[in-house]
Image (tube, grey):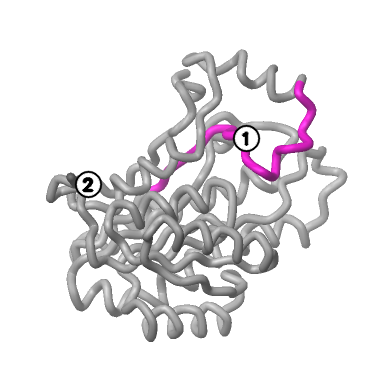
Amino acid sequence: MITPDFNIHGRVALVTGASKGLGKAMAFGLARAGAKVAINYANSREHADRTFREFRDAGLHGMLVRADATDESEVARMCSEIEAELGPVDIAVFNATGPQPLKPIEDYDWAFYQEMYDFFVKSPFLVTRRVLPHMKKQRWGRIINITSEVFRRGTHPFSAYVAAKGAQTGWTRAMAGELAPWGITVNAVAPGWIPVERHANDPEEMKEGYRKLIPMGHFGIPSDVAGAVAFLASDAARFITAADIPVNGGMTVT
């Protein structure tokens, strides 16, 4: 039984980049907590259809919606489709991401830097601006950014991703103060390296090297992140805003 403070029954949640990996776990976690969830994806229809079949088979309530969350017109269409089928968005979780190559600054160009900022700043900005009138009217809303431990750790050579995640963290804090008077919380969840589908071909020695650094001695799993997101979406977190919760087994203790 879900205790009242943790129950988000009837709320409408949008999770961007939710057809697989951490986003999929977040979408399922929010739905299990009672929300109606819009599962956003941009490219892989095959992954998205498979995820949504699994979602429905689990008896969960929501919809699948395709949109590029960095494109203003597509964001507007996506939100309109969600409103028509599920209702206005109460909870927005920003997880969509692109390629994450590690390489020295000389091998990047500005176009790639811009792509990172589009995912981690432009997309949250566009979606928040679109759903905010409803949240302000009802004086309740949850905006949750999926950031990363890389900002605190200064991971290198990874400058484009780290810089954009730092900007997303700053945006989270600024928006938290701006929207607090309306009862809208703005928080971030900062995962460590939690292997999912995109890491299937990463070298085992790289994974093992990271695992040995984790104070808790083991990798996290997607549901660890989903739990933090579901908590922040609930009324149990009503007085928490501007937080950046690390989900990394202690990697950023020092």
The percent position of residue 123, horizontal first and vertical second, equals: 54, 66
Q: Earlier in the sequence, mark 1 or mark 2?
A: 1
The percent position of residue 152, horizontal first and vertical second, equals: 52, 33
Alpha-carbon neighbours of circle 1 within 10 Å: few (<14), some, or many (≥20)? Answer: some
Q: Amino acid at mark 1?
A: Pro
- Residue that lies at the very extreme toward the left in this rendered image: 4
Which residue range is magenta in the image?
Answer: 188-204
**Picture quarter containing residue 113?**
bottom right
**Picture quarter containing residue 224?**
top left
**Residue topped by disc 1:** 195
Q: From the viewer's perspective, tell me whether residue 232 is left or right of residue 151.
A: left
Cα distance between the residues tagged 1 and 2: 27 Å
Question: Residue at 68% of width from left, 64% of height from top?
Answer: 46
Callout 1: SS = loop
Question: Residue at 60% of width from left, 66% of height from top?
Answer: 49
For the N terminus, the image quarter is top left
- Magenta includes 193? yes
- Residue that lies at the very extreme toward the front in this rendered image: 57
The percent position of residue 204, horizontal first and vertical second, equals: 76, 23
Callout 2: SS = helix
Tally of numbered discs: 2
**Residue topped by disc 2:** 237
- Magenta includes 62? no
Q: Nearer the viewer, residue 78 or 49?
A: 49
Question: Residue at 57% of width from left, 29% of height from top?
Answer: 153
